[in-house]
Image (spheres, rainbow, N blue to C red):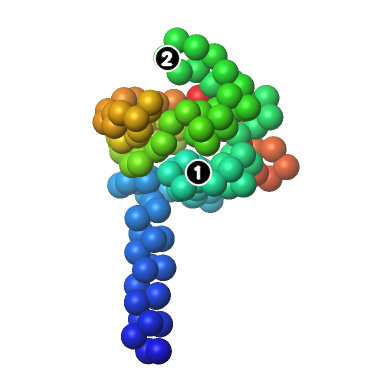
Amino acid sequence: MKISLVVCAVLVGSTQFWGQCVKDYQPKSADEAEIVRVENQWCDAAINRDASQLAPIFADDLIWTENDQFTDKAGVMRRYMVDERELVLELRDVKIKVQGDIAVVICRVHVVKKVDGKTIEKTHTDDDIFRKRDGKWQLIVE
């Protein structure tokens, strides 16, 4: 029984460590710390295909651009839950600018994902714009 508890504790601790996709960033305020938490939640939810954790991150009026196309929250949820399978997400060289109820996150994203049965690995720059509504930071533009 003791061995099971130790193994369980190690696995839980490991999961929390591995779940941190934002690398090498020290928040300078409570708002920045919360945005980092939301970014980490986003990564974990995407990798685990957890719609209940992913959906609240995206504002209902989300505008998303990718591959020269625009989509909305429903399209983004479909992307994460059906179209693509995120395997690895790491955010590096993160910079966060908070101005009132708006925050901008720019970073370099390393991603490994499966699309149409093919594994794709790439690194690209990214801009996320969040807005604080009712005390919660939500993505409004990606």
Asked if residue 76 can be seen in this view, the reply is yes
Give how far across and how far down residue 25 sits, in percent.
35, 46
Instruction: Examine the rendered structure and indicate whether residue 30 appears above or below residue 39.
Output: below
The residue shown at (68%, 45%) is 135
In the rendered image, the quadrant that contains the N terminus is bottom left
Q: In screen coordinates, is 28 left or right of 114? A: right
**1 or 2: mark nearer the eye:** 1
Kindly indicate the quadrant of the structure image that contains residue 43: top left
Q: In screen coordinates, is 58 left or right of 105? A: right
Give how far across and how far down residue 133 sits, in percent.
69, 38
The residue closer to the viewer here, 98 or 113, is: 113
Asked if residue 99 can be seen in this view, the reply is no
Identity of the amino acid at label 1?
Answer: Arg
Give how far across and how far down residue 129 sits, in percent.
53, 28
* Label 2 crowd (10 A; few <14 / some 14-19 / many >=20): few
Asked whether the residues under the numbered discs 1 and 2 touch, taking CB atoms below 8 Å apart as contact, a structural biologist would say no
Element under disc 1: loop
Identity of the amino acid at label 2?
Answer: Asn
The residue closer to the viewer here, 140 or 26, is: 140
Residue 49, label in figure:
1
Element under disc 2: loop
* Label 1 crowd (10 A; few <14 / some 14-19 / many >=20): some
The residue shown at (58%, 43%) is 51
Q: Label 2, on which residue?
A: 67
